[in-house]
Image (cartoon, grey):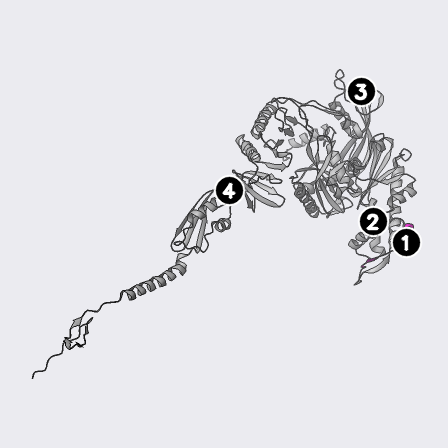
Amino acid sequence: MPRRRRRPRQEGYEQSVPLVLRGRTIPRRDVRPRVSVGVAVFVAVLLLGVGGLWFAFSPRFYVLQVRVEGAHRVSPEEVFAASGLERLHILWVNPREAARRVVEGIPSVTAATVACHLPADCVIRVEESPTLATWQVGDSLFWVDMAGGVVPATEPLEEGWRVTGPLPVDEDGRVNEDVLTALVELERLGVSPQPVMYREGRGLVLTDEEGWRVIVGEGPGMAERLEVYAQVKAYLLAHGIHPRFVDVRFPRAPYYSVTNEWGGGGGREQGAGSREQGAGGRGQGAGSREQGKGEASVTERTIVGIDVGTSKVCTLVGEVSEEGGLRIVGVGLVPSRGLRKGVVVNVEEATEAISASVAEAERVSGYQIERAYVALSGDHISSLNSRGVVAVSRREEGIGIEDVYRVLDAAGTVALPHNRQLLHVVPRYYVVDGQEGVRDPVGMHGFRMEVEAHVVTGSTTAVQNLVKCVNGAGVEVDEVVLASLAAAEAVLSETEREIGVVLVDMGSGTTDIAIFIEGAVWHTATLGIGGEYITNDISIGLRLPTDVAEEVKVRYGHARPMQVGPEERFTAAPFGEGAPQSLPRWKLAEIIEARAEEMWEMVGREIKHSGYDGLLPAGIVLCGGVAMLPGMAELGREMLGLPVHVGAPKGLSGLVDRIGGPAFAVAAGLMGWGMTAEGRPSPVPRGPSLGKRFLRWLRALLPGQAT
């Protein structure tokens, strides 16, 4: 029987098994298999889950890099932090619209676009509002844009306004709209960007391209005020008037002044405010001043004084109110360096000390100091009394301020060596046609006018070195003022000046003396001895370092040993000792008394040398750092037989808690000197004489000589 060939098994088929069901046999057959739907769904879900997890956690779909473009004033870090794009899934979450709205809310940003691309890259493009000003608040800088947005800055912008002072921000954190209007309006008027100050209650104060000081103010009506300023400026320039101050806070009555005073006028065509200045007045050539009256007379201005002493440099910033009061708004007090006995011996160190003092005063006051009155001391100072005579130029009109200037100039014509220069010509009294004792000759009729003046001179080298140091600190010198005259402004009363008084300013390196009789200064002198003289002897006598000796003198010093108990002691660390030692206070007082007696003896000899020792019923007013030593005034009273009391600055308000003592009499007096500076003639350097000019002209004609 032939063998049956086996049928090959086909893929996808399986053979059936014969079944017997109730006696019936089901034949074998091939069937196609069917995949379960449930299994397929399970597999599909599994694949989708694994893919979704990979898609969700793969770094390829997260924002890993953000680039910020177009940001200059706003830092890219600030834009990136505000956008919130870090670690966001760019396909699951679409952050672009939300990020754009947040970025556009940043100050100084006007528009923004956000675009994200695979792989994990986003770009933020910002458009910034134009910058209007760099605003300095203390040591911090901010950029202010045209919309008032404020952004912290690291350095000032090369263009735009530079403003100092507190930021006038509204509730929304943007700069006050009126202030923004002023800055925008100034640019529209063509005023070039110059330093601008902002003070609460005073508003904007700027220096325009002509060098004029302009008080703009604040509040509504800014555009109107600036339009008045433009009209006033055009009028003044057309008439050849160059004022130092212009005030447009009151548009209906703007004010200007060609000096530090304010003249008044009405309407928008500002006229010259009536201002008659005399000479005399307190013996300093600053006579009666009648100010022009308008609808709102304004005399508020700022005065800066710098006292460059041997032990400290003190810078004061004061505001003069309408009532004539002085409010101290800035104080800069630092230890002095580079000076010895009131004279600069190291220009670099002195400049650094002055710069530090000025910077501190600027931080406290908010002002940018550009000009200041500077005190001068030192034993190089000398003085003499001189007489000047002139003929009245316009006899029918009376004596004018020009005649006063001429007669004082004649009194200052004294023979000086080439190494000395004129500092002050202070009138004592005037004589008009033989009538003596005239205080203010302006307006009087006469043919011949004379003046008895007190002339102060100083070393040209010492003065120039001091001015160089102040200029090196970025400050121009309005006037160099003798320290004793400045201190007299702060501590002497009119009564004391009239009946006769001696001002003695005992500083660290020098002692300055000024004698006032009949309201004027009659004698000045400077002694090369001061508080350092006492400190050095304490250092030697008690074997203490100089800085420790100075501290001991200030804390435990006394000029009267009899008033110190024998049991009183203090601790100090002498040279070579590891630990402080207990020292008797009476021994310290004996050292101080010996040196203080020598100082008072020198003062007494100078008073006798002046010849006015019998004309001083008001006695001595003592100021300076040494005046704070207990018993110093009492010792002087016993030795000289004159009334002696300690004088402190008067008539000040504001930050007087720091400068209220006698050690700050000179610095405070510079404020008073600046208030009365207008109308006081200041010495003008003289040119070469006619003979010297003729010789110079002949020398220029010689071959090889430069003209």
State the image coordinates of residue 299 (x, y, percent, origin top left): 69, 29
Spatial CA span between label 1 and label 4: 70 Å
- Nearer the viewer's eye, disc 3 or disc 2? 2
Reading the image, the residue beneath label 4 is 108
Helix, strand or loop at mark 2: helix
Direction from residue 541 to residue 465 in the image, left or right: left
The answer to whether residue 569 is magenta is yes
- Residue type at mark 4: give it: Ser
* Amino acid type, label 1: Gly
Q: Amino acid at mark 3?
A: Arg
Give the structural element (helix, strand or loop) at label 4. loop
Task: Tell me if residue 529 can be seen.
Answer: no
- Name the residue beneath numbered marker 2: 533
Determine which residue is flagged by label 1.
Answer: 565
Q: Residues within 10 Å of mark 3 (few under 14, many from 20)?
A: some
- Residue 687 locus on image (x, y percent): 71, 31
Q: Earlier in the sequence, mark 1 or mark 4?
A: 4
Q: Could you tell whether 531 is left or right of 142 in the image?
A: right
The foreground one among 374 and 22 is: 22
Q: Amino acid at mark 2?
A: Tyr
- The x and y percentages for residue 167 are 60, 40
Give the alpha-carbon distance from disc 2 to disc 1, as whole Å.
Answer: 25 Å
Q: Quadrant of residue 206?
A: top right
The crowding category of the residue bearing disc 2, from other C-alpha atoms within 10 Å (few below 14, some 14 to 19, many at least 20), is some
Q: Residue 413: which quarter of the image?
A: top right
Q: CA distance from mark 4 to mark 3?
A: 70 Å
Nearer to us of marks 4 and 3 is: 4
Q: Quadrant of residue 192?
A: top right
Which-is-in-front pick, marks 2 and 1?
Answer: 1
Q: CA distance from mark 3 to mark 1?
A: 66 Å
Relative to 463, residue 266 above or below: above
Q: Element type at marker 1?
A: loop
